[in-house]
Amino acid sequence: MLLQGSEMVSAAEERLGPMRLTQEPIQVLLVFAKEDSQSDAFCWACERAGFRCNIARTPESAVECFLDKHHEIVIIDGRHSRYFEADAVCRMIRAAKHSEHTVILAVMPQIPSDQEEPSVLPLLSAGFSRRYLENSSVSACFNELIQLEHGEVRAQFKLRACNSVFTALEQCQEAVEISSEDHVIQYVNPAFEKMMGYHRGEVIGKELTELPKSDKNSADLLDTINTCIKKGKEWQGIYFSRRKSGDSIQQYVRITPVIGQGGKIRHFVSIKRPYSDNHRQVHKLSKEDKSCGENSQSECNSLRHKDRRKESVDVRSISSHSSDAPSLQNRRYSSMARIHSMTIEAPITKVINIINAAQESSPVTVAEALDRVLEILRTTELYSPQLASKEDDPHTNDLVGGLMSDGLRRLSGNEYVFSKSALQNMSQSELAVPVPLNDIPPSIAELLNEEECWEFNILELEAATHKRPLSYLGLKIFSAFGVCEFLNCTEATLRSWLQVIEANYHATNSYHNSTHAADVLHATAYFLRKDRVKGSLDQLDEVAALLAATVHDVDHPGRTNSFLCNAGSELAILYNDTAVLESHHAALAFQLTVRDSKCNIFKNMERTQFRTLRQAIIDMVLATEMTRHFEHVNKFVNSINKPMSAIEETSSNSEGSDCEGQASIRNSPENRLLIKRMLIKCADVANPCRPLENCIEWAGRISEEYFAQTDEEKRQGLPVVMPVFDRNTCSIPKSQISFIDYFITDMFDAWDAFASLPGLMEHLAENYKYWKNLDEMKCKSLRPPPPP
């Protein structure tokens, strides 16, 4: 068989758990011509380890002793060639029967410091397993023996157990076929030879596709089997195989993928038996079911795939232990028949069926290309691009891993819990009295006069308002967009609501605080004022966007979703490790709003309108979660950018029809949803498109927050999800370059093509050039070093 030794050991370790793999005690043979401190040290080490030790003084006595005891470890003295040649002794033992599972160690003299380290290849060629440099310390010898026991010796025990397993396979009455990950046959047992009519030499080494196939299997069935086993899941069902003689045989087949090195599928094990009389009786019953067509007998009972880690149900064991077995089988196979006749089809199923049909009449090259298309469509990560290796780009890999995953799904004993519940710890009496819009201090009002400009400096507003920019900016922007009028609430209620929301942002966070929320609110309002955006959304959409921007990070703890999941936080448990923070932000925002009439901005809304507004807010807040970043961007590009561009390119001189076509694309409910998601996503991460000084400040703030998370992960013994964000080694310019390259550029190109944002794109280009220059200078900080 063509299995690699390491894979055999791995498979044995996983599947031979109940077998006893070791024998006690381990036996060691020492081949030393003379007794000296080195041989004595190994003797004492064997005694300490609990191993049995024999000593041989000549090559002949060594072979004789080995043939009698079959030692697990043989240690040969290779220091003094005047007594015997160690290589020759090793070859003599290797030539003995059943020596392939023995570990042979060569004891070699120490290498002088002025000499070059000699190659171990001659020793390995002679049959030695490894080399031991002379050291008469009993502890050193003991350590060597223990390492051998836990390494090579244990591996050899497992290989011996594999021989027993293959002996069982040779005697098994069911046909067994083992193929590689590339579907090359590597083993068949005698039962397979008898059933299929092939001699094993005729099939081993051949690809499964080289063997003749029965034409009684439908293409859908073969496709289903391949799809199932490629996902690492077991498939079992009825299948037609073609014997060497050319006739077809109906079999009950179970195909199990075997996971090996690297967590990848390394082998497929197929167990086959003839479709027995009991099975035919059940099949006949299911065939009479009206939901199963006359020509679908191979499909009716075929599809039963499950996770390979779960216990499977053996049909024969049911029939032999229960008088109800035929009826149980009948129900199961009838259910499978009804599944095949279902008329409910998901859109992706229809697409796959169309491609399958197209393949039948396509040239080979086109059919192969469509195979690749089908393979991609069947994956779950349709929108996530594949990164280079971590070694090639560690900054991007760590950044993406930290932002686009929900942690390692491993709960630890460390519970990360918010210090106090926001709902329990806040009361209206603790909040400062809201200031009416007309009473805003002149210095703040002067700053707010610039809020319609993209260059508006939110950091100056943060300083002027003593870290309360959200309430003031919110009052100004909400007034400009008529939010109170739409919600039918008073300005006092809106002021109270803004105060409550801002109070539940953590001022101690360097980045995710109310200044960030105000910055996102400002960007949202700026985008809403762009002509094409304004022409695509109605007032409910605008109000939803402004409210979502205001609350999108409320009560953010300054840690990522991955951190919360790894820490086993209460929120991660509550939201099942899925969009943890975004779900919390949306839920808490509504809890804070409705708990007190003084700040309930929704209390006067009509129920249906409120539910529509609520759903729009929730959807936009959840859209800020990064695991679906590429899905949102790609849908926007394919549903809005490309169709609108096509209309522009193909339209005639009739300008009106062009505008009407584009408007119909923008104003459909589905595309308005995509526009709102794209709008808040761009607003949320617009820092690289801000003027340079603001961009640098925000980069420093987010880096500090990530540094603090890495520090805490190390303190708590949690997985470090973004190792490059170590405050002692991190290159901030590299992290910004990676973030812009991976997340920002494509998204803002798409958003600019829709909303027309030339000023932002100029800032983005300038900022990217700034970070590139710092990186080329090997500078890891926010700013270049001062000139000497």
Image: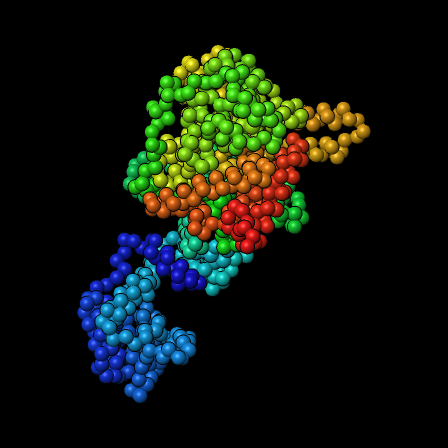
In the foreground, 286 or 304: 304
Kindly give the residue lying farthest to the front in the view shown: 788
In the foreground, 630 or 183: 630
- In the picture shown, does residue 758 fall above or below 195? above
Q: Which quarter of the rendering shows the C terminus?
A: bottom right
Q: What colour scheme has been applied to the protein in the rendered image?
A: rainbow
Q: Position of residue 711 (x, y in %)?
A: 38, 45
Residue beneath the point at 37% across and 57% down: 10
Q: Position of residue 643 (x, y in %)?
A: 68, 33
**Is 752 left or right of 655, judged from the image as shown?**
left
Q: Which quarter of the rendering shows the N terminus?
A: bottom left
In the foreground, 755 or 145: 755
Find residue 212 and report its image quarter. bottom right
Residue beneath the point at 39% across and 79% down: 114
Q: Position of residue 611 (x, y in %)?
A: 49, 18
- In the picture shown, does residue 723 fall above or below 74? above
Q: Mark yes or no: residue 329 visible.
A: yes
Q: Position of residue 493 (x, y in %)?
A: 47, 15
Kindly give the residue lying farthest to the right in the view shown: 653
Find residue 529 and report its image quarter. top right
Q: Mark yes or no: residue 612 visible.
A: no
Number of dots carrying numbers: 0
- In the picture shown, does residue 260 fall above or below 201? above
Residue beneath the point at 48% across and 55% down: 181
Residue beneath the point at 43% across and 48% down: 726
